[in-house]
């Protein structure tokens, strides 16, 4: 019915405002871009030099081959 929808809107509005205010960063010390792909993550640091690397998940028993 309409009553639960109205209650959810009244709960969501203050939460969204708070999330927006907490997300704002004026002078970040470091900027990191993380992109999730299907089987790995890509990271990019663009503040200093253009540094990029990929991170693959491995099992604990699997040796590091890199």
Image (cartoon, helix red, strand yellow):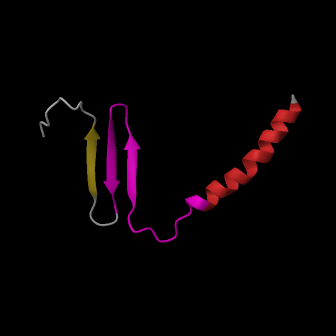
Give the residue at x 26% y 64%: 49
**Left or right position of 3 against 49:** right
The quadrant the N terminus occupies is top right
Stretch in magenta: 22-46
Q: To which quarter of the image does residue 5 belong?
A: top right
Q: Quadrant of residue 65?
A: top left
- Is residue 55 placed above or below 14 in the rendered structure? above
Q: Was residue 47 drawn as part of the magenta stretch in this picture? A: no
Q: Is residue 9 left or right of residue 61?
A: right
Q: Residue furthest front?
A: 61
59, 24: nearer the viewer = 59
| Left or right of 21 in this view: 39 | left
Q: Where residue 38 appears, x then y in whole percent? A: 37, 31
Q: Is residue 31 above or below residue 12?
A: below
Residue at screen point 59% across, 60% down: 22
Q: Position of residue 2 (x, y in %)?
A: 87, 32
Residue 51 picture location, percent across and down: 26, 57
Q: Give the residue drawn at x 40%, y 69%.
A: 29
Compared to residue 51, the image places residue 54 above or below, namely above
Count of marks, rendered view: 0
- Residue 59, by quadrant, is top left
Q: Where, quadrant-wise, is the C terminus in this rendering?
A: top left
Horizontal side of 16 relative to 33 (left or right) equals right
Residue placed at 28% from the left, 59% from the top?
A: 50
x and y percentages locating residue 10 in the rendered image: 80, 46
Q: Does 26 appear in magenta?
A: yes
């Amino acid at each position: 019915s309409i009553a639960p929808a109205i209650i959810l809107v009244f709960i969501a509005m203050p939460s969204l405002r708070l999330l927006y205010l907490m997300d704002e960063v004026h002078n970040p010390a470091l900027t990191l871009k993380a992109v999730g792909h299907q089987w790995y993550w890509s990271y990019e640091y663009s503040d200093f030099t253009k540094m990029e690397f990929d991170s693959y998940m491995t099992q604990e028993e699997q040796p590091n081959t890199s």
